[in-house]
Amino acid sequence: ALTARSAERLWQKGLPLHLVVMGSSSDRWPGKPDTRLHKMGMLPAGEISRTLQACDFQAAPYLDGISARRTAAMAGIEHGLAVLSTKGRLTDSSLPWGGPLPMVDAKDERGFCELLERLLLPDERQRWAEAGAVFCRDHLDREKLAGQYLDLLGSIVRQSGVRRRPDGP
């Protein structure tokens, strides 16, 4: 609903914004039909990738906030898009979200709309997309994440005092 209300505001200003909505929520998109709104529905992974590659940026607001578990937003970042999102109770504070991703509080409709309008500027999109690529490389690299996860599990095992069985793993 946040993206829909922001898009309506920008359309009322006459700004050239087209929205592509993917996933099951596209069927429940609020508002009246519009030629600038493209409801894609559920897509296979390859189609999602091709659709993201055709986009200039991604708006990914979440009522409870962005996190690394938000696969749609992470896919946008991995595809080199500037991703606009929101902070909320589930936003992982251990990651520096605000630097690479344009973000506002999940309830800040005006701020979201303002950032969405800024993303219509090519230089802003490029700057945020480049920062997102650095963020992805530095914090979301799969090998780094797997290593961190294994380190965490090892730490938990060591702290618990659990010992390996002589006949098992």
Image (cartoon, rainbow, N blue to C red):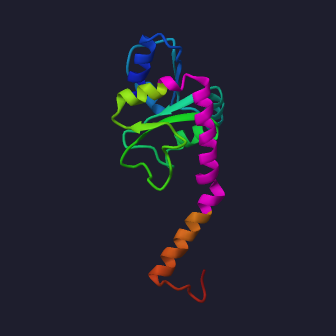
Closer-to-camera residue (114/140): 114
- Residue 144 lies, with reference to residue 109, above or below; the image says below
The kind of secondary structure the magenta stretch mainly shows is helix
Residue 121 horizontal/vertical position (percent): 57, 23
Quadrant location of residue 8?
top left
Q: For residue 4: magenta?
A: no
| Quadrant occupied by the N terminus | top left
The magenta stretch spans which residues? 117-146
Image coordinates of residue 73 in percent, x first then y, are 53, 40
Is residue 141 positioned above or below 147 on the image?
above
Residue 31 screen position, x and y as percent? 38, 17
| Residue occupying the point 50% across, 13% down | 15
Outermost residue on the bottom side: it is 166
Tell which of 34 and 113 is nearer to you. Answer: 113
Q: Residue at x 64, y 34 (%)?
A: 49
Can residue 1 be seen here? The reply is: no
